[in-house]
Image (spheres, coloured by chain):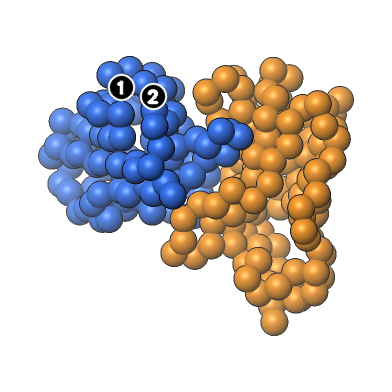
Amino acid sequence: AQTIHQWPVAEIKAVGSPLSLGCTIKGKSSPNLYWYWQATGGTLQQLFYSITVGQVESVVQLNLSASRPKDDQFILSTEKLLLSHSGFYLCAWTGDTGQLYFGEGSKLTVL
Amino acid sequence: GEQVEQLPSSLIVQEGASVLINCSYTDSASVYFPWYKQEPGKRLQFIIDIRSNMERKQTQRLTLLFDKKTKHLSLHITATQPGDSAIYFCSASSNYQLIWGSGTKLIIKP
């Protein structure tokens, strides 16, 4: 069975500090991977997607970057956090029918 | 770009009642419309989807209707249970991008 795991579960960071969030998928070869941002209880905004190792497409410009260093790993990062980066970050992969399978999310608070 | 509007933003009903959640989208190029559910403290979970070549899809207590002409979808949940309490999201997909509605918070009163 496929599993998706995100880390860390939660982070409290200062404005201007760097950030790295990670996501690992096990049991699925060459998955399409996605990063989403969700405001508390709000709608989701797709940030990045990747269909293969080393290739990442940006959907919106939010002073964030993403990388896919391995087939099963997707990393979201920034060198300088803004207050507006606070929220819930979700990693997901798509199954063969197109449905998304989400990780448990990483809650980011920027102070 | 694509925009998805979802209404109502919240709904409180008695257990056993039926509910209707509506979504409309703007981009006629969108071909795939999945819906997800987010229960408190749990992961977003896929519940039902429909493609633009279909008008209706049903699974257990969920019925999803799609009108390509009016660019409108509606999700009907029957015989609601307390476990149905969650935020429901509709979305519209074109290529690799998914645009999401703002969510409908559904509360089922026992």
Label 2 neighbourhood size at 10 Å, few (<14), some (14-19), many (20+)?
many
Q: Position of residue A95 (x, y in %)?
A: 52, 37
Q: Which element carries disc 2, helix, strand or loop?
A: strand
Label 1 neighbourhood size at 10 Å, few (<14), some (14-19), many (20+)?
some
Name above or below for residue A36 compared with residue B95: below
Q: Which residue is drawn at 61% across and 34% down?
A: A97
Q: Residue at x 24, y 41 (%)?
A: A21
Of tags 2 and 1, the one toward the viewer is: 1
Image colour assigned to chain A: blue
Q: In which quarter of the image is residue B61?
A: bottom right
Q: Is A56 positioned to the left or the right of B61 in the image?
A: left
> Are the residues tagged 2 and 1 within 8 Å (C-beta)?
yes
- Residue topped by disc 1: A53
Q: Which element carries disc 1, helix, strand or loop?
A: loop
The reply to whether label 2 and label 1 mark residues of one chain is yes
- Residue topped by disc 2: A50
The chain letter under disc 2 is: A
Name above or below for residue B105 compared with residue A22: below
Q: Nearer the viewer, residue A82 or A10?
A: A10
The chain letter under disc 1 is: A
Name above or below for residue B7 compared with residue B33: below
Q: Residue at x 69, y 18 (%)?
A: B29
Image colour assigned to chain B: orange
What amino acid is found at the position of numbered circle 2 in the picture? Ser
Q: Position of residue B14 (x, y in %)?
A: 76, 76
Do we see residue B52 in this rendering? yes
What amino acid is found at the position of numbered circle 1 in the picture? Val
| Cα gap from disc 2 to disc 1, whole angstroms | 7 Å
